[in-house]
Image (tube, coloured by chain):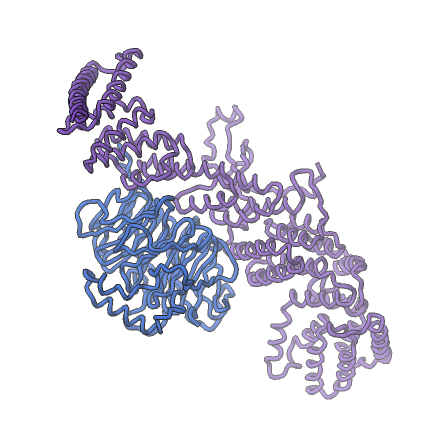
Chain colours: A purple, B blue
């Protein structure tokens, strides 16, 4: 076992007396907890215990309505990503961007989402874009601008007033713009100040010029980093000269702006309030002191920025740790910290999957199960499966877990409650698409059993035919035959008459179908067809022996018809069947099982049959003889 | 298709239906109803696609559909039909059939009428009712016909507390859907591939006619009748096949068209352009079938409409003679002519598309991926 990364969080369950013994049982994604009377002493005191069983869910976020939208949309993206994997790994970037878009849509509602988005975007810049020195800083600037967006409302607010430069937050606004590297906007604000306040117009113009001339790397520019660095040094010297010449001595605000533009750490830290957080500080500091920072050096600046910003006053929070791990390019640490800090698996599962697709995750085998990507996806999917409605999303995640996905799906899918046939059909489709025959059988059997309990034999038979479950088909066929014996007529003719090839599933079902066919032929007065079918049912041993008496009784009216229907040959066969049956009955010595009265009826029946058979035989012999004679 | 817009609604949608337009209205419908399934709490909701001009609380965008009102529904919504402009009939997996009334003045829904045990299983030796899911409804003011997993057919009148007519054990298997053929006649489809026609004028519990798929007994899940030619019926099956039937003749489908890869959940003829057909499926696809294209003898849609009305003006009794020259584009069985053009309407494949409805130029569909898609320019 690896050591624990932190103490596990304590969850208090309302209503449970923590002083008592508690028993629990694990379930997928949730846990059952109840009080026990384990301690015998307490039992004698007869203290009424808590009568409830509590269900404890660890993945509460799954139940949030807003997050459900995110889960569904990201599911679509996930499936899309798996499909295009072979074509282009680069496309995953698109997926990331989309995920981010959907995240942004709801970030106003759940604060944790904005944290996730912050981490996601940073990971995107560092791991997926893999920006080199130069563009790296531009990406980081975008990242900060995206997540520290209060400035836009402030900007609108200040510009909305008739006289912006008199607004109380005017200088704050200009500072923030400079901190975020939005120098063009800052310059425009300065020109307004210059218009309103002629005394400082000169200073504003000079600072504005400095802002304008600051060399920056633009995406379309072809200049090399060395050229840029050279220009930047010159510009920086000019700034310093102005500061030394006390150009801005008359205006402390402008002076401090100039210091910020020189990357003066003390001046930056003075604006702690406006910077909000250490990563903003980091990016601003890099912008004005190391614009061509290399990815490798990033973690050094990050660490020192964090230390400086916190100033030993407070300790880093989980989010800080995650971001720091990202700046250190330690993917595994990022994932680990996220898993500990975030309350659901959605984020880590998708992030890990994306990184895996970009071939950034060297297979890091865990001591349980498979690699990390699969482990996290399994966790996430299991969480979805424990949800009453989101289980359908989980299926696709399991599909993309090569090692343990299938077994997990098999175990989960059987435990989905099936309250309607439509839902059952959806589950069956999932199983059939994946050739999970065992699960198909068991689901069909559940449904067949349910139908039997509801006295819906037709449905039950349909389900057992679908499951190709011969044993159950036999059972249902027996019920049909029993009902027939009791009521004297068949139910569910629409089904039995249309069995088709499905009839061959079990002998009893074949018999049921054929026996019904006999009745139909009889009803249509096709006596000779009916009689030969009846006979073949017995001679071919399809009919269960217990049913022979009924069949022979059915033959009675045919034997008594005016015209001869059974030939002499067929009559002999019938006689043999009858004798077979009676002799076997004697052998078995059944009498005690049957009441004497029933026995009487039986004897009469047999005698009537013998008489009818003998008479028919006589008629048949005469007829056949005379036909041959004529 | 660019014109289709999606919205995630945090519930799996089982049914979507447009509100019918008042007769003679030239506007397009702006309101539709949806039902959800498989949630802890299910809802019947009304949505509007009208432009509200600003963002809603969810951060949705202009032109999106907005929730007007919703009401809790006990059990999964298995089927949903507008009874008239204000009333919606919902079928529940608990066997209950409910009529909801929409109060337009304060945008609320309330229960107007309810038949609690419309569908139920009867235990052999006990009087206890166990609800059986009601799977399909069809409305024709003032009548409502419902079918269910218990194989029962109920005929209700909206103002009667009790069922007007009940056919117990109408089917030995599950009835999946129902629609009106001509007013006293309905057609049902079941889980063993049969199409049964019932005539409420006949006494007794036997169908007037049984048509069936041969051989495989593939379950049929949905049925719709051609809006003008009442003998033409389309059904969709478990294997995703689209079958076209002519109920006047034969006991087998006129044509079988290979369509989706999984269960076809719904099929709808376009109510005013019956040469267009729409189907949706468990495999996550939504298709538009266009049979109006490239019929040499059919010069224009207008012409065809004219012929259809000729047909309608004749009594049903001698339709066969009159109709011989006017074969519906869906009934011609010439395989050489590949006349039907099929377009897929959803941009990416998602989870099951459970339901769709078309009215005028608008289409709405709902999926298990908890999204509702609306297209407002079907024929652009």
- Along the viewing direction, whichever of A344 and A520 lies nearer the viewer: A520
The residue lying furthest to the front in this view is A630
Percent across and percent down for residue B302 are 32, 74
Percent across and percent down for residue B209 are 24, 49
- Along the viewing direction, whichever of B255 and A394 lies nearer the viewer: B255
Horizontally, residue A357 falls left or right of residue B75, namely right
Percent across and percent down for residue B235 are 35, 54
Q: Is residue B3 depicted above or below A8 in this figure?
A: below
Q: Quadrant of residue B144?
A: bottom left
Horizontally, residue A416 falls left or right of residue A460, namely right
- Examine the rendering and report whether any part of residue A80 can be seen: yes
Horizontally, residue A376 falls left or right of residue A133, namely left
Residue at image position (41%, 49%) is B238
The residue lying furthest to the left in this view is A562
Q: Is residue A457 depicted above or below B50 in this figure?
A: above
Percent across and percent down for residue A30 are 53, 41
Q: Quadrant of residue A619?
A: top left
- Along the viewing direction, whichever of A145 and A387 lies nearer the viewer: A387
Count the marks. Answer: 0
- Along the viewing direction, whichever of B145 and B305 lies nearer the viewer: B305
Horizontally, residue A420 falls left or right of residue A26, namely left
Q: Quadrant of the C terminus of chain B?
A: bottom left
- Examine the rendering and report whether any part of residue B69 can be seen: no
């Amino acid at each position: 076992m690896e050591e624990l990364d932190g103490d596990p969080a304590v969850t208090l369950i309302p209503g449970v007396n923590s002083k008592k013994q508690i028993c629990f049982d694990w379930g997928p994604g949730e846990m059952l907890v109840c009080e026990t009377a384990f301690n015998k002493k307490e039992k004698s005191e007869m203290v009424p215990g808590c009568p409830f069983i509590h269900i404890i869910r660890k993945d509460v976020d799954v139940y949030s309505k807003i997050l459900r939208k995110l889960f569904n949309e990201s599911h679509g993206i996930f499936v899309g990503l798996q499909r295009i994997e072979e074509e282009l790994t680069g496309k995953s970037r698109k997926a990331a961007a989309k995920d981010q878009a959907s995240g942004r849509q709801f970030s106003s509602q759940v604060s944790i989402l904005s944290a996730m988005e912050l981490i996601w975007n940073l990971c995107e810049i560092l791991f997926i874009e893999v920006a080199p020195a130069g563009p790296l800083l531009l990406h980081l600037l975008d990242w900060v601008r995206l997540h520290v967006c209060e400035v836009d409302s402030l900007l609108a607010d200040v510009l909305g007033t008739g006289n912006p430069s008199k607004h109380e937050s005017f200088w704050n606004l200009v500072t923030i713009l400079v901190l975020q590297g939005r120098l063009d906007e800052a310059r425009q604000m300065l020109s307004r100040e210059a218009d309103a306040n002629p005394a400082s117009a000169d200073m504003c113009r000079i600072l504005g010029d400095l802002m304008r001339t600051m060399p920056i790397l633009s995406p379309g520019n072809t200049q090399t980093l060395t050229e840029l660095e050279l220009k930047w040094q010159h510009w920086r010297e000019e700034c310093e000269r102005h500061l030394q010449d006390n150009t801005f001595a008359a205006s402390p605000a402008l002076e401090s702006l100039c210091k910020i533009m020189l990357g003066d750490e003390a001046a930056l830290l003075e604006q702690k309030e406006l910077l909000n957080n250490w990563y903003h500080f980091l990016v601003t500091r890099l912008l004005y002191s190391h614009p061509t920072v290399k990815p490798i050096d990033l973690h050094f600046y990050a660490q020192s920025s964090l230390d400086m910003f916190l100033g030993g006053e407070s300790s880093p929070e989980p989010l800080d740790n995650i971001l720091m791990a990202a700046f250190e390019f330690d993917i595994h640490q990022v994932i680990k910290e996220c898993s500990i800090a975030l309350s659901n698996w959605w984020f880590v599962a998708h992030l890990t999957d994306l990184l895996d697709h970009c071939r950034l995750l060297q297979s890091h085998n865990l001591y349980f199960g498979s690699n990390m990507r699969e482990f996290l996806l399994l966790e996430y999917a299991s969480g979805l499966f424990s949800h009453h409605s989101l289980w359908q999303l989980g299926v696709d995640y399991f599909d993309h877990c090569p090692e343990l996905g299938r077994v997990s799906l098999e175990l989960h899918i059987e435990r989905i409650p099936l309250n309607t046939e439509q839902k059952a059909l959806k589950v069956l489709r999932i199983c059939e698409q994946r050739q999970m025959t065992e699960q198909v059988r068991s689901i069909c059997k559940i449904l067949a059993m349910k139908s039997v309990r509801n006295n819906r034999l037709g449905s039950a038979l349909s389900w057992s035919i679908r499951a190709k479950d011969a044993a159950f088909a036999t059972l249902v066929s027996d019920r049909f035959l029993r009902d027939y014996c009791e009521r004297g007529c068949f139910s569910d003719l629409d089904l039995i008459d249309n069995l088709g090839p499905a009839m061959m599933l079990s002998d009893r079902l074949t018999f049921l179908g054929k026996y019904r066919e006999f009745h139909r032929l009889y009803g249509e007065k096709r006596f000779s067809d009916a009689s030969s079918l009846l006979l073949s049912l017995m001679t071919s041993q399809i009919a269960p022996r217990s049913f022979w008496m009924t069949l022979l009784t059915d033959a009675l009216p045919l034997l008594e018809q005016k015209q001869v229907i059974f030939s002499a040959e067929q009559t002999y066969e019938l006689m043999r069947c009858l004798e077979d049956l009676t002799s076997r009955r004697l052998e078995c010595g059944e009498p005690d099982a049957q009441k004497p009265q029933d026995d009487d009826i039986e004897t009469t029946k047999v005698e009537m049959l013998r008489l009818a058979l003998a008479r028919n035989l006589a008629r048949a012999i005469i007829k056949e003889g005379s036909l041959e004679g004529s | 298709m660019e014109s289709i817009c999606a919205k995630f609604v945090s519930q799996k949608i089982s049914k979507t239906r447009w509100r019918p337009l008042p007769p003679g209205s030239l506007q397009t419908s702006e309101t539709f109803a949806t039902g959800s399934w498989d949630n802890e709490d299910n809802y019947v909701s009304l949505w509007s696609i009208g432009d509200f001009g600003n963002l809603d609380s969810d951060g949705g965008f202009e032109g999106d559909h907005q929730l007007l009102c919703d009401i809790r529904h006990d059990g999964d919504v298995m089927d949903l039909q507008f009874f008239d402009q204000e009333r919606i009939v919902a079928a529940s997996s608990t066997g209950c059939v409910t009529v909801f009334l929409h109060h337009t003045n304060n945008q609320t829904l309330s229960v107007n009428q309810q038949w609690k045990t419309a569908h139920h299983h009867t235990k052999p030796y006990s009087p206890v009712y166990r609800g059986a899911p009601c799977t399909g409804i069809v409305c024709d003011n003032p009548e409502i016909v419902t079918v269910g997993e218990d194989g029962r057919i109920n005929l209700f009148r909206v103002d009667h507390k009790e069922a007007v007519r009940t056919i117990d054990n109408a089917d030995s298997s599950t009835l999946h859907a129902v629609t009106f053929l001509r007013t006293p006649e309905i057609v049902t489809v079941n889980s063993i591939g049969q199409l049964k026609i019932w005539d409420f004028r006949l006494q007794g519990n036997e169908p007037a006619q049984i048509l069936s798929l041969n051989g495989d007994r593939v379950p049929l899940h949905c049925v719709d009748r051609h809006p003008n030619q009442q003998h033409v019926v389309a059904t969709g099956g478990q294997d995703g096949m689209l079958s076209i039937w002519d109920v006047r003749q034969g006991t087998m489908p006129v044509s079988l068209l290979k369509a989706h890869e999984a269960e076809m959940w719904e099929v709808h003829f376009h109510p005013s352009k019956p040469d267009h057909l729409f189907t949706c499926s468990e495999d996550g696809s939504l298709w538009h079938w266009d049979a109006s294209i490239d019929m040499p003898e059919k010069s224009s849609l207008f012409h065809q409409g004219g012929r259809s009305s000729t047909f309608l003006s004749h009594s049903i009794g001698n339709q066969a003679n009159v109709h011989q020259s006017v074969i519906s584009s869906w009934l011609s069985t010439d395989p050489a002519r590949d006349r039907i053009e099929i377009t897929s309407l959803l941009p990416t494949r998602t989870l099951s598309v459970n339901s769709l409805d078309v009215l005028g130029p608008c289409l709405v569909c709902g999926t298990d991926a908890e999204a509702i898609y609306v297209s407002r320019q079907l024929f652009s």
